[in-house]
Image (cartoon, rainbow, N blue to C red):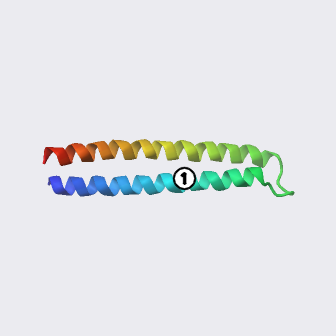
Amino acid sequence: MEEKKIVELEKQVEDYRQFGFVLLSLSIFLFIGLVLPPSYAPQVAAEWLIAGIGGALTFAWLFNRKVVQCQQKLFEEEDQQ
């Protein structure tokens, strides 16, 4: 039972890391789109890009916090064995 829980926590850590990395990459691409806008894009699009960047960075930060929490649980489980 404990081994199954450890494997599940390891999978969660890996998944949350990947989610955070994808969101961080997305925010970088959105920032590039904000800095180098096409000539046909209206100014309103900049506000949406800023909101998207903020949202992506917020969720990336939340996933990073979740990784830290899962790693702490994983270390506690390994110490108990």
- The reply, left or right, for residue 28 in relation to residue 59 is right
What is the crowding at mark 1: few (fewer than 14 residues within 10 Å), some, or many (at least 20)? many
- Give the percent coordinates (x, y) of residue 51: 66, 43
Residue name at image x 69 percent, y 50 percent = 31
Tell me which corner region of the image, top left, top right, bottom left or bottom right, holds residue 76.
top left
Residue that numbered label 1 is attached to: 23
Q: Is residue 62 above or below residue 24?
A: above
- Give the percent coordinates (x, y) of residue 40: 86, 57
Question: How many discs mark residues in the rendered view?
Answer: 1
- Give the percent coordinates (x, y) of residue 38: 82, 58
Q: Residue furthest right?
A: 39
Q: Is residue 69 above or below residue 38?
A: above
Amino acid tagged 1: Leu
- Give the percent coordinates (x, y) of residue 1: 14, 54
Q: Nearer the viewer, residue 32 or 59?
A: 32
Residue name at image x 37 percent, y 43 percent = 68
Q: Is residue 54 above or below residue 4?
A: above
- The reply, left or right, for residue 47 in relation to residue 25 is right
Secondary element under disc 1, as helix, strand or loop, is helix
Residue name at image x 36 percent, y 52 percent = 13
Q: Nearer the viewer, residue 67 or 45?
A: 67
Residue name at image x 61 percent, y 51 percent = 27
